[in-house]
Image: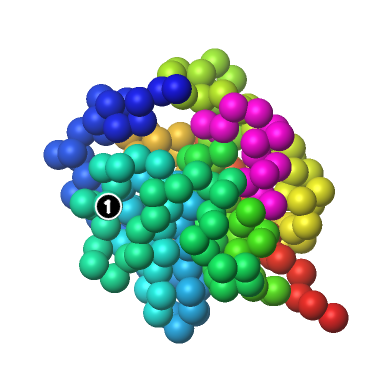
Amino acid sequence: MTDISALYRFRFRESDLPRKMRIWRALCKGFFQQFVDPASTVLDVACGYGEFINNIQAKRKYAIDLNPDTSRFLNEDVVFGQMPANNMSEIASNSVDFAFTSNFLEHLESKAICDSVLREVHRVLAPGGVFVVMGPNIRYLAGAYWDFYDHHLPLSHLSLQEGLSINGFEVIRNIPKFLPYTTRSLIPQHPAFVTAYLKFPFAWSILGRQFLLIARKPAIG
C-alpha cells in the first residue's frame, strides 16, 4: 500500500498551502457556497489538507481522510476522522446535508471500491442532501492523467454520472469542464482573477480539465 503521508509530502510543498488556501477561499465564496446552507452539516470526503472544508461556511463540519498528517491543517471547527471513505462508521446515516469530494475517486483501485464509496456517501446523506464531486476528466487529459503515481481509476463526466445514478443518486448538473487540471495550471492565482474566472463559463470550456457533478439523494416520499 502506498504511504500516503510520504507521497503527499513529496507532491505538495507545505509552503504552497497558503496560496492554495487563497484559491479555495475564492472558489468557495464565488461558487460552492451557493449550494451550502450556512446552517447545514457538511462532510468533506478525502479532505486533503482542508482546502475546501476550512473555507466553506457551515454550522457543522466533518472531514475524513486516511492521511494522519491531515488533522494539523484543519481549522478548529472541523471534526476530523481518519477513516476510509467506504466505511465511515463514525458518521450516522442521514446526518449530512452536503457532501463534497475533490480529486479523490481517481485514486481508488477499482470500480467496485468506487461503488462502495458512493453507497457510503449516499448512506450518510439526509434525504434531499447534495453530493458535489470534482475530479480530472480522462476525456480531456489522456496521458497526463497517469502522471501521478497513485492514479488508478480513469473517469469521465459521463462514466461518473452512470456510477452515481446506479448507486442511488439523481445527477442534477454535469459540467464536463470546470477547473484546470491542477492549481499550478493556467487558472489565475490571484483570488480576484479566480473569482472572475468563475463568472465566465466560456473560460471553463477553454481551460477546464476537471469535471464537476452535482447529485442529490432523492427525498423520501
Q: In this picture, is 183 found above or below 53?
A: above
Circle 1 residues within 10 Å: few <14, some 14–19, many ≥20: many
Residue at the front extreme? 89
- Tell me which segment is drawn in magenta: 106-119
Quarter of the picture containing the C terminus is bottom right
Whether residue 198 is visible to the viewer of this picture, yes or no, is: no
The residue shown at (57%, 49%) is 87
- The residue located at (40%, 42%) in the rendering is 66
Q: Amino acid at mark 1?
A: Ser
Which residue is label 1 attached to?
71
In the structure shown, which secondary structural element does the residue marked by tag 1 occupy? helix
Q: Can residue 216 be seen by looking at this rendering?
A: yes
Q: Position of residue 147 (x, y in %)?
A: 45, 18
Magenta segment main secondary structure = helix
Q: Which residue is at the front of the view, 162 or 174? A: 162
Of all residues, the one furthest to the bottom in this rendering is 39
Residue 6: x, y in percent? Answer: 28, 26
Quadrant of image for the N terminus: top left
